[in-house]
């Protein structure tokens, strides 16, 4: 045994430990756990009032095992095995599968593997067993039990959600329970939730003093969820006048709070919409502004980026392949070609990191496609801007059809990695992680682009070619090369936009068409030829759109008004917000 | 001399083809769907299913009329998501190709644009996609789900589960508008107060509610504010969302829902335009427990369905029609209803003994034509709607539905708006 | 005075007019179905549609080929004309709709029980025609005035027209506008008392479209020969010089813009009764771009070019959506790219382009030969010849 193998064994050991999964393994059975197991099994098999009683019992146990099993039950992962003698045995399947995709079943009542009469462990595929059925009412009851169990869950979000539901249950027996929990709770957010829940439940108290106190508490906490209950209480005719007044003032203060929440929310939504617009329009600003090329295929560059993300996601997963059959045949055989990439079948953190790989690859793929486009078609169209519009429109049609042929006419599923799911709440205003990520990334991209244009040699050449192509060429600048790189860069930015848009929108062959008109508007309003203008106009248009939507209540009116405003704005400033002054007339 | 030789060979070849063509008796059948454009996402699958059904019938010998067996010859045309083009293609199918029947259309606007053509040329159209039920033409057989075969059973189920508040959300066109109006009236008739119906109202000059719910245009992607609105609406509990958003926009909507952390247990969303096909592009892992209501789910565990799916998958592997995608295929209700439509028509033709539209229509309207399809028994009613099973399902992480309730043999009813108006008037509301 | 090309054009146009307006309808009406001379009702209908598209194409060309203004929103005016005719046709349905109510079907399922005020005057054909002139005219007038006054040119103008048509499209998709929303107007029954289903009415509409196209063509032809036409072309070639010469180019451009809108509207209002449906997707930016493509393929800067382009591209589309439904977009896209890159004058200019190429080829051959002649082989030959 050499020195090398010692660490090797150590690493192997670590890996083996990591591979152990969280499925309930056969336990040695502590006395309490056994009782819980029996109750669980009974609860699954029974129904009606008896089931409810058992679920209540389980809720009081505070057992994490009960949590796990009940959770699995709601996800249809608890199955019923019909034994040869006709009795049903509730089981769960372990996650490890053998070569034929079957796994062993773990009995819920005693935690052992299910064995047949001879003592051999039985194996089942997923479709061999019927899941223990749940209807909505049962799921609510299970969820309720889970909520009670979740009161002591380590995750504060779960505790908050549980507290919230208990508060809305209108069951006053929870008040003591919640008050007990309040003393032990450390997380500020959950504490607020508990106070709200207690106050909401106290609204139903017969003692008017308690009710009054509860109403005042709700007003102080600005509890939005209690509005319905307050309205209900207000409709009660035998309230004392002080109580009625207190209720009205509470409702008023909560409505004010809602107004402020919507205000800040709208501003955040406006910035996030603006950042999406900016992302989409930046590439266009470069190709259009710096080169005078109207690229109607810009939307398809976005789609290229989004599809690249999809392909990367699949490569990290189970692989990607496509097959195209053309309706033409050579010598009797139809022309068909395809591609098949095996998947990495990654799991866990490696799989979730696919998005980080997808971002630079989307940029590269779109840049390459843009390069190809430039070399074959665009380079002939530099002095003819209107023709570039038409030719690139043709390219856009062709690309859309190619997407349909390769990926299918349907939209494809691109999942967000779970570090982008979720949101951050401040005082009822929620900030989604993926939106924050987009905003952050867009800031980076804008700074990067500005650095490229202002501080690098390539940027200098680009600006020179933009200002006066022939003079730059006379000075020895290789204009063809600069054109190629600029167009590729602009297309690459579109690809990046596509990668992000795949997280918040859909990915399909005609996804580019949704964004093309908006990106043109942004670029034109911002002033062709500079980045700062595009930034301002994107943020302005995004915020205006969201504010109008909030004011008018209709999603479309806002957009129409924004478009009309753009048309009118261009009367006042025909060349956009920030223009490049030059001595030429046009 | 060379030229003469070439011409003679060509003539002989053509004659041979003509003769060969005559040896087989065929009947032309039209397929009118959008194979490009925005609706291609949904409609290409219907074309694929129809080709499968035709191949099945031809493999079993064809359609028996008189004492001859006729093979089906499909004429597939592309409406390109362009409604005037649909009308032109419909005319082409009926007046140039003289097809015996047409299976087609998805959106109500495409159906409405071809309806005058079918009525003028007395053609027959089988329409398989859930719709608002405010139409009844003797030239259309509606295998599709009417409102009382989809929206109303779902709402019944929700009411029975204790849901008290309903947020109505849809795309701005006739199907969601009408369905939401019908549901609004239905909820009122069942004791739900207008404050518990969310999304906003449009009233006409006299104050009567003419539209309920929030509407977004096609292809809309920015649901931040709407989801924030829903969150506030559902903050008090016991709320649900009735989602009639069509097509593409569902994806950004559900992505926003997931990001906002609105779980199906807090506020279930029942969607009427989402089936297995659309679920392929939505993050279903985070949406376990949302609801759908159709007259067919791919996860139905009947022997007919298992057999149907096995044959469909086998056909996918062996067929070589251009444009049919082989991987990751699912079957949803509109596809299954297209399939049922083909067999219902076949049965009607065989019973009538002719392809003539009048004769076939007479047989269809007799109420005797039914087919035991993968979703169960489907029967054509005298008003040319169909009676079929209705299922409610919840979404699973793998994009399939788990069936949690079944309504057997629901009779399709058109003109629900009028019916509910009379009912509400009787209740004095 | 009459150049050769003008003579050819005149003969071609007269021949085409006679065939389209007189011969084809006669063949449709007076020959029996099944004989090879018969033109079916379906074909008449399709050709009528193409004639209306040709009018749209001329309106695009009038702006683009002759004035240098690329408008990406002409389909808006086409649709507006169509909508006005559509409103009249909807009123003419009377109580024969699905609901058998005196108001249009879509209003019934939107919950209305009485006709809204906006709809009341449309039972008069004259009013509908007036609106078909006023609405596009006013809209184009206001928009054009604002745009040209601020000297918006070139690409910006195109993008602005795109914004206009997109905003209108969004507006018309809204059901609350009471213009049918996404369903639009359909299920027409009568026009001016004639049943729309009868082949006689369809033939009549076809003849009207043909005559309208002919009149539009003659009018535009005359316009281009006047001083106005010359200024128009001067604006296309160099607007600044025209400005410096003292003309108010904004007014000229405004006039042409409104005129083009009216021509498009005329096309639209003849299109709707033949096609049987109008809905907001006709206003989408993509449809305007299609019209621009017809002009590009046919040949801009001529009047016959757009007509030819409209026919060619739409015929190709009708054929391709049947023959290669999965590939036709590739054909279309590829065709646009090729036309833009290699045939800037379109199909009309193709003979001239080929002739020029041939000339170039011959000239090059000739100059090569000349170079060989004028550069004889080196002096090595001379040494071989020795006077003996």
Image: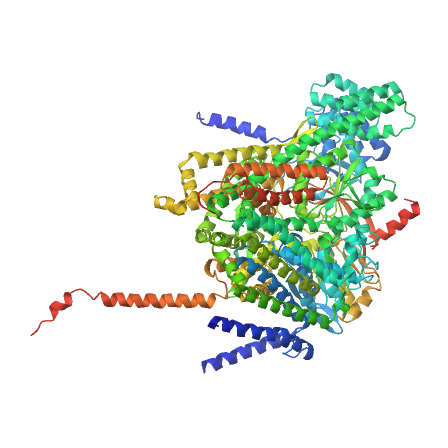
Name the quarter where the N terminus of chain A is drawn: top left
Residue A532 in the image: state x and y as whole percent: 52, 36
Residue pictured at 60% horizontal, 64% vertical: C54
Quick check: C329 left or right of B71? left
Q: Position of residue A22 (x, y in %)?
A: 65, 30
Identify the coloring: rainbow
Direction from residue A582 to residue B385 in the image, left or right: right
Q: Where residue C377 appears, x then y in whole percent?
A: 20, 66
Q: Residue furthest left?
A: C388
Residue with the most extreme bottom position:
B1
Give the percent coordinates (x, y) of residue A341: 52, 46
User: Which of A196 and C264 lies nearest the eye of the viewer?
Assistant: C264
Residue furthest front in the image: C246
Where residue A523 sits, quadrant-wise, is top right
Residue C106 position by quadrant: bottom right
Q: Is residue C370 visible?
A: yes
Considering depth in this image, is B109 or A186 the residue closer to the camera? B109
Between C339 and A169, the one lying in front of the other is C339
Farthest top residue in view: A183
Q: How many marks?
A: 0
Residue B343 visible, this angle? no
Q: Is residue A249 left or right of residue A363?
A: right
- Which of the pair C385/B11 is nearer the observer? C385
């Amino acid at each position: 045994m050499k020195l090398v193998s010692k660490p090797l064994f150590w690493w192997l050991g670590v890996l083996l430990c990591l591979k152990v999964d969280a499925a309930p393994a056969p336990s040695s059975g502590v006395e309490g756990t056994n009782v819980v197991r029996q109750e669980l099994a009974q609860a699954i098999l029974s129904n009606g009032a008896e089931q409810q009683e058992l679920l209540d019992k389980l809720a009081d146990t505070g057992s994490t095992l009960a949590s796990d099993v009940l959770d699995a039950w709601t996800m249809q992962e608890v199955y019923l095995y019909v034994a040869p003698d006709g009795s049903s045995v509730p089981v769960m399947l372990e996650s490890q599968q053998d070569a034929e995709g079957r796994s062993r079943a773990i009995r819920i009542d005693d935690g052992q593997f299910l064995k047949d009469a001879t003592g051999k462990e039985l194996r089942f595929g997923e479709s061999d067993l019927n899941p223990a059925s749940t209807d909505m009412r049962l799921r609510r009851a299970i969820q309720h039990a889970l909520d009670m169990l979740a009161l002591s869950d380590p995750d504060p979000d779960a505790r908050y959600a549980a507290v919230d539901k208990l508060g809305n249950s209108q069951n006053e027996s929870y008040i003591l329970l919640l008050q007990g929990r309040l003393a032990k709770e450390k997380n500020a957010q959950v504490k607020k939730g508990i106070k709200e829940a207690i106050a909401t439940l106290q609204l139903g108290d017969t003692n008017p003093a308690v009710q009054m106190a509860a109403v005042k508490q709700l007003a102080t906490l600005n509890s939005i969820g209690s509005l319905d209950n307050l309205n209900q209480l207000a409709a009660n005719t035998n309230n004392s006048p002080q109580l009625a007044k207190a209720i009205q003032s509470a409702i008023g203060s909560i409505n004010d709070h809602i107004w402020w929440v919507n205000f800040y929310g709208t501003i955040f939504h406006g910035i996030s919409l603006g950042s999406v617009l900016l992302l989409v329009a930046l590439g266009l600003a470069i190709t259009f502004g710096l080169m005078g090329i109207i690229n109607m295929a810009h939307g398809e560059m976005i789609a290229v980026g989004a599809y690249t993300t999809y392909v990367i996601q699949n490569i990290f997963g189970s692989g990607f392949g496509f097959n195209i059959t053309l309706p033409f045949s050579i010598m009797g055989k139809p022309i068909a070609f395809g591609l098949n990439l095996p998947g990495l079948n990654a799991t866990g953190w490696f799989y979730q990191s696919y998005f980080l790989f997808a971002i630079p690859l989307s940029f590269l793929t779109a840049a390459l496609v843009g390069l190809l486009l430039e070399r074959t078609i665009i380079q002939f169209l530099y002095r003819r801007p209107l023709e570039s519009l038409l030719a690139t429109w043709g390219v856009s049609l062709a690309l859309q059809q190619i997407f349909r042929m390769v990926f299918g006419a349907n939209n494809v599923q691109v999942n967000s990695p779970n570090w982008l799911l979720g949101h951050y709440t401040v005082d009822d205003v929620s900030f989604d992680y993926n939106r924050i990520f987009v905003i952050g990334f867009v800031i980076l991209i804008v700074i990067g682009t500005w650095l490229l244009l202002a501080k690098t040699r390539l940027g200098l050449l680009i600006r020179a070619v933009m200002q006066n192509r022939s003079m730059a060429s006379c000075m020895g600048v290789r204009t063809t090369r600069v054109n190629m790189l600029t167009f590729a860069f602009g297309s690459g930015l579109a690809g990046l936009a596509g990668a992000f848009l795949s997280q918040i929108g859909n990915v399909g062959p005609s996804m580019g068409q949704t964004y093309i008109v908006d990106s043109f508007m942004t670029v034109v309003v911002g002033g062709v030829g500079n980045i700062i203008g595009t930034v301002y106009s994107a943020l302005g248009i995004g915020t205006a759109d969201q504010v109008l939507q909030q004011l008018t209540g209709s999603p479309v009116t806002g957009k129409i008004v924004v478009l009309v405003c753009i048309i009118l704005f261009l009367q006042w400033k025909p060349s956009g917000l920030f223009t490049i002054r030059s001595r030429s007339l046009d | 001399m060379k030229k003469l030789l070439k011409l003679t060979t060509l003539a002989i070849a053509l004659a041979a083809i003509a003769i060969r063509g005559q040896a087989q008796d065929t009947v032309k059948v039209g397929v009118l769907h959008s194979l490009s454009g925005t609706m291609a996402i949904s409609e290409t699958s219907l074309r694929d299913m129809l080709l499968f059904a035709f191949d099945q019938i031809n493999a079993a010998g064809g359609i028996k009329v008189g004492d001859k067996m006729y093979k089906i010859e499909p004429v597939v045309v592309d409406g390109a998501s362009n409604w005037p083009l649909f009308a032109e293609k419909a005319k082409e199918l009926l007046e140039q190709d003289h097809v015996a029947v047409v299976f087609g259309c998805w959106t109500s606007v495409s159906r409405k644009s071809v309806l005058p053509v079918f009525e003028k040329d007395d053609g027959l159209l089988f329409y398989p996609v859930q719709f608002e039920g405010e139409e009844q033409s003797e030239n259309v057989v509606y295998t599709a789900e009417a409102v009382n075969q989809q929206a109303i059973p779902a709402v019944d189920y929700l009411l029975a589960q204790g849901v008290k508040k309903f947020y109505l959300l849809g795309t701005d066109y006739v199907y969601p508008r009408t369905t939401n109006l019908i549901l609004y009236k239905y909820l009122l008739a069942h004791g739900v107060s207008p404050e518990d119906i969310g999304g906003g109202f449009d009233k006409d000059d006299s104050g009567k509610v003419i539209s309920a719910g929030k509407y977004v245009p096609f292809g809309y992607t920015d649901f931040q504010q709407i989801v924030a609105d829903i969150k506030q609406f559902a903050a008090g509990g016991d709320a649900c969302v009735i989602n009639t958003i069509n097509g593409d926009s569902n994806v950004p909507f559900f992505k926003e829902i997931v990001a906002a952390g609105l779980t199906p247990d807090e506020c279930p969303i029942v969607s009427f335009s989402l089936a297995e096909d659309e679920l392929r592009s939505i993050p279903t892992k985070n949406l376990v427990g949302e609801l759908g209501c159709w007259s067919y789910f791919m996860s139905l565990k009947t022997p007919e369905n298992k057999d149907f799916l096995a044959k469909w998958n086998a056909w996918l592997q062996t067929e070589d029609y251009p444009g049919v995608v082989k991987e990751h295929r699912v079957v949803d209700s509109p596809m299954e209803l297209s399939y049922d439509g083909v067999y219902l028509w076949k049965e009607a033709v065989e019973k009538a003994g002719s392809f003539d539209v009048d004769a076939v229509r007479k047989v269809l309207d007799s109420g005797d034509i039914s087919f035991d399809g993968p979703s169960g028994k489907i029967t054509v009613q005298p008003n040319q709607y169909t009676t079929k099973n209705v299922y409610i399902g919840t979404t699973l992480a793998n994009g399939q539905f788990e069936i949690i309730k079944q309504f057997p043999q629901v009779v399709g009813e058109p003109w629900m708006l009028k019916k509910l108006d009379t009912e509400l008037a009787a209740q004095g509301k | 005075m009459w150049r050769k090309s003008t003579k050819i054009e005149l003969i071609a146009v007269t021949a085409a007019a006679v065939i389209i307006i007189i011969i084809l309808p006669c063949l449709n009406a007076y020959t029996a179905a099944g004989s090879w001379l018969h033109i079916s009702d379906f074909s008449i209908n399709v050709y009528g549609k193409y004639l209306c598209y040709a009018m749209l194409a001329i309106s695009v060309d009038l702006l683009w080929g002759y004035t240098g203004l690329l408008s990406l929103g002409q389909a808006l005016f086409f649709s507006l004309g169509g909508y006005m005719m559509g409103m009249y046709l909807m009123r003419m349905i009377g109580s024969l709709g699905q609901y058998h109510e005196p108001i249009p079907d879509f209003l019934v399922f939107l919950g209305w029980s009485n006709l809204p005020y906006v709809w009341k005057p449309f039972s008069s054909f004259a009013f509908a025609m007036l609106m078909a002139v006023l609405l596009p005219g006013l809209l184009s007038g206001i928009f054009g005035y604002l745009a040209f006054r601020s000297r918006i040119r070139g690409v910006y103008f195109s993008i602005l027209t795109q914004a206009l048509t997109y905003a209108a499209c969004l507006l018309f998709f809204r059901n609350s506008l009471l213009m049918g929303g996404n369903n639009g107007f359909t299920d027409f029954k009568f026009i001016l008392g004639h049943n729309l289903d009868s082949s006689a009415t369809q033939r009549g509409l076809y003849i009207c479209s043909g005559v309208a196209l002919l009149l539009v063509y003659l009018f535009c032809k005359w316009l281009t020969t006047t001083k106005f036409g010359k200024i128009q072309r001067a604006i296309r070639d160099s607007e600044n010089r025209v400005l410096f010469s003292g003309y108010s180019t904004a007014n000229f451009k405004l006039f042409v813009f409104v005129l083009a809108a009216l021509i498009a509207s005329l096309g639209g209002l003849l299109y709707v009764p033949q096609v049987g449906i109008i809905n907001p997707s006709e206003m989408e930016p993509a449809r305007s771009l299609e019209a621009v493509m017809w002009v590009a393929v046919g040949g801009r800067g001529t009047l016959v070019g757009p007509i030819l382009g409209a026919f060619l591209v739409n015929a190709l589309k009708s054929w391709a959506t049947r023959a290669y439904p999965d590939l036709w977009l590739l054909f279309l896209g590829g065709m646009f790219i090729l036309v833009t890159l290699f045939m800037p004058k379109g199909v009309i200019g193709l003979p001239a382009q080929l002739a020029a190429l041939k000339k170039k080829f011959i000239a090059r051959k000739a100059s090569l030969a000349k170079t060989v002649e004028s550069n004889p082989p080196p002096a090595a030959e001379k040494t071989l010849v020795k006077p003996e």
